Every structure is written in C-alpha cells, then in structure tokens.
Image: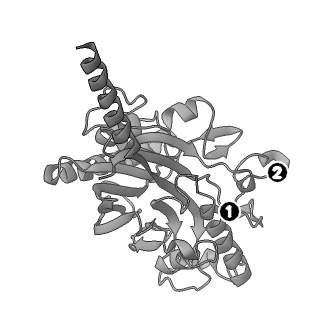
Amino acid sequence: MKRILLAALAALFVLSAYCEEKRSIQMAGIAFYNWENLFDTIPNNPEGRDSEFTPDGPRQWDGRKYREKVHNLAYAISQFTTRTTPYGPAIVGVSEIENRSVMEDVVNQPELKAWNLQVVHHDSPDARGVDVGLLYNPRYFRLENVTNHRLTAVPFRTRDQMCVVGSLLGQRIAVIVNHWPSRLGGQEKSSPNREAAAALCKEIADSLWNVDPEIGVIIMGDLNDDPQDKSCAKVLGAKRDRDGVPAHGFYNPFWRMLDKGIGTLAYKSSWNLFDQIILSGNLANGPEDRWHFYEAKVLNFDFLKDTEGTRMGYPKRTYSAGSYLGGYSDHFPTEVLLRRYVTRK
C-alpha cells in the first residue's frame, strides 16, 4: 500500500512538473509620452495657431530643428525596451502633436522602422492646435475602433479625449488618451477644468463597461495634476493602493512613486508627476491568466536629462527661456508593464 501511495505521489509530481513546463509568461508594455510641441514647420493653420513654430515665427522653427526633434523622439522610444519586450511597448500614447504627419515622421525614423508602429490620430479643437494620439505595434495589439470625446464642460477649446479599443494579444482593452486642461491661472482656480475632464473619463469608462463588463480600461495622459489631486483621487477615484480596488474602479501606480520624490516634470525645484497611466481594477488585480499589473516606471533615462546648470537632472527640453536646447521633451515618459501566464497546449 505504501509503495502504491509513493508511486501515485511520484506520478502526480511528474504531471505537475510537466504542466509547469508548459506554462509561460507574457509581458506587454503600455507607455505614455508628452512630445512637447511637436509641430511641423509649415504655417498651415487658418487661425495662425502654429505661427510660433514656423521658420519666420519667434522660435525660428526650421527644418533642421524639426528633424532633430523627430530623431530625438524616435531614439527615445526605441529605448523603451526590456528583455521581455524587445520590440518596445505594445501601445504608446502621445500628446502635444500638431497633426498625423508628425507622428508618421517619428515612426518612420530608422530607430523605429522595424517595429512597424501604426498611428491613430484625430484633430482636436484645441486653441493651441495640439492633439493627442496613439501608436501601437500590430504584432501585439489589434485595433477595433476609435471614438473621440469632446470636453464641453469648460469655457474654452481643449483637447478631445481619444478612446482606442482593441485586442491585446487576444484580450480586449480600452485606452483613453488625455491631455487635460492646464493650470493657467493657478492650480486651485483651474482645478474645476481638470475635474470636468476626469468626470468625462469616468463617463467613457462606464459606457465601455455597460457594453463589455470584462474589458480592461487604461486612462493615460498628461493630466496636469498629480495623483493625489482632486481630479484623479476624488473624481476619478484612482486609489494609491491596489488592494481592494473593485473591477470597475481605478488604481494609480504612480501615486507611490511621487511619494518617493520621483516625477516626470520639475518646476521651481519641485517634482510633479502629471504623466500618469491609471488602470481599472480588473487590470490591477486580474487573475493570473489575464492581463494584470506587474510594474510601473518613470523612464527618466540619463540621456533625457539636463546635465548642467540649474536644471541639472530635469528633463532636457527643446527650448528653455526662448533658447533652443535641442532636447527631447520637458516631460519624462512613463510606462506600465502588464503580465499574464499562458499554458501552452
């Protein structure tokens, strides 16, 4: 009897080991990057909203500067790789772009050409003439549909919110790309504008869940607020800790980063973390065989930083105090990694 029991246990161990060998891990990166006024050099806006970024404008924005900026951004994105994501993120949301063509110029640079990144863009009514957009790698993400949502609860023209729905290696997700209203006039006075933007995000998410309760929702963008501010923490309800976040609630993995003094932009020796990627509860705490949160990062690579002067360690921007620096952006990019376990048949 003892022999039979030992043999059964040995067989169970072998079966368990065999099943474990057939189990693999998949990783997917989801990133966001503010491109800091990526305008082309052509004065083609009928309202003159792009006049600042033309050869005859105050910034003397010419072909050489434009090509350098496009190359810099492409190189930066080419570094968004890990051992488990050798072709970079599946999705990269972007902001402060003038039009579709500037996005195409970036993805067609030699550093990114092999990734075959696809472009999603929509013209917004923003008074400065900048939009949001999204890049995706078709080997990981299959696009289903795109909707654009206007923020009508503010007394000025601002960026639309872009909702991109698709399949991330077979599992449906929705990404809402944002660039919320600025802090012009002061943080407190302008806060209601961003609270309205957060309410619109929540409304979009709720409408997605009404159709598909299982869909994972990702809210990303330059929110012009920090994780603990009212728009994010109260209106959107994005929590600092993921434990207990309901499936249709939100978890903000960048809150704890800012607590540690890590930010994406700096002002007067103080860091802010406006560039956030917020996950629905069913992505924050999903089961092992579905996409779930693994890690969040501020991609503050050394080459993206100023190396001298009062801004040493800050993002190396394109212009500072009217002087051309030839940098990348005044924001660091951010990324979250999602993970799931897959059993091979």
- Which is more toward the observer, 11 or 209? 11
Colour mapping used in the image: one colour
Badge 1, how many Cα within 10 Å: few under 14, some, many 20+?
many
Q: 10 Å neighbourhood of mark 2: few (<14), some, or many (≥20)?
A: some
Disc number at residue 328?
1
Task: Give the number of the disc on residue 307.
Answer: 2
Q: Tag 1: residue type?
A: Tyr
What is the three-letter code of the residue carrying label 2? Thr
Residue drawn at (31%, 45%) of the image = 290
Nearer-the-camera pick, 241 or 339: 339
Q: Is residue 234 visible?
A: no
Along the viewing direction, whichever of 323 and 136 lies nearer the viewer: 136
Earlier in the chain: of badge 1 and badge 2, it is: 2
Question: Where is residue 232 shown, x and y percent of the image?
Answer: 40, 39
Q: Is residue 197 above or below residue 133?
A: above
Q: How many marks?
A: 2
- Judged left or right of residue 6, residue 271 is right
Local SS, label 1: loop
